[in-house]
Image (cartoon, grey):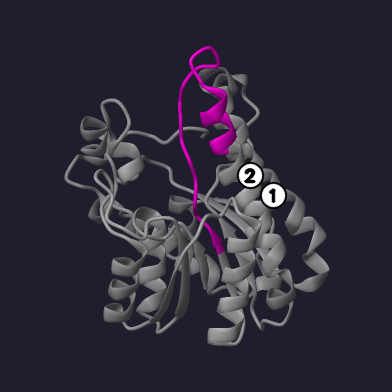
Amino acid sequence: MLVSGGSRGIGLAIALRAARDGANIVLLAKTGEPHPSLQGTVFTAAEQLRAAGGQALPLVGDVRKDDDVAAAVEAAVRTFGGIDVVLNNASAIDLSTTDALSMKRYDLMADINVRGSFMLSKFSLPALRRSANPHILTLSPPLNMTPHWAGLHLGYTMAKYGMSMTTLGLAEELKDDGIAVNSLWPCTIIDTAAIRNLPGGERIAKAARRPDIMADAAHAILTRPSRGCTGNFFTDEEVLGHEGITDFSGYSLGAPEDRLVPDIFL
């Protein structure tokens, strides 16, 4: 499994769930040194993966940089013999309106979210084609064209929908290769550093679910036969419901289910 931005949060939770199955995981993330406002580094994440039962190769790199992404793909193939799963997890968020959004922040979201997901998927294709059950899973929302979402935070909406367009296009382009390409999005806010760092984030996080719900949903998707599971924009509840799980209260941080904050784009 090749994961972008898996030092913490949802990406790390998904990697930890795979590690419990003994997976070999390559983490490509920028945080090599402790960050003042973000918990964990790519190296502490790798330690957690090994403790959970997997193998881990931590790589400090930037998903925006061609050479870093190419090196991560090469290292995955060289170290573990191939790539079965690409998880496009790295993402930047800024919910500012157009007037307030700086072009630097706009470029950051476009480069990480859209270009990064496209490039990591593209560079991994030769290895994925050699896999027995290849999957690309991107953490991005359904393409909901209701104007409401674009009107709230246009820059971020375009960046996240760009990730979803990658899913839409690659699923069609790669269907004859048997490479599953899907997106996964939570029905509620998930407790992550990205949420807590938003204005009012600590309050919002109290009405969130733990990243484990996304990890369990991703695990269910990634263990399905790739040829029969592609081109989907899944939600976590939808996937787990298909697995027979309908009580999601165990994933919450204590707030009643009817008090949880719904996620955007749905």
Image location (x, y in percent) of residue 54? 37, 82
Give me the disc on residue 50.
Answer: none
Image location (x, y in percent) of residue 99? 53, 12
Label 1: element kind: helix
Name the residue carrying label 2.
114
Name the residue carrying label 1.
166
Residue type for callout 1 = Thr
Please say if 213 is above or below 207: below
Label 2: element kind: helix
Q: Say which label, 1 or 2, has the lower sequence index.
A: 2
- Residue range highlighted in magenta: 87-109
Residue drawn where x is 72% and y is 49% of the image: 168
Residue type for callout 2 = Val
Foreground mark, 1 or 2?
2
Question: Crowding near pointer 1: few (<14 within 10 Å), some, many (20+)?
Answer: many
Image location (x, y in percent) of residue 6? 42, 60
Q: Is residue 89 magenta?
A: yes
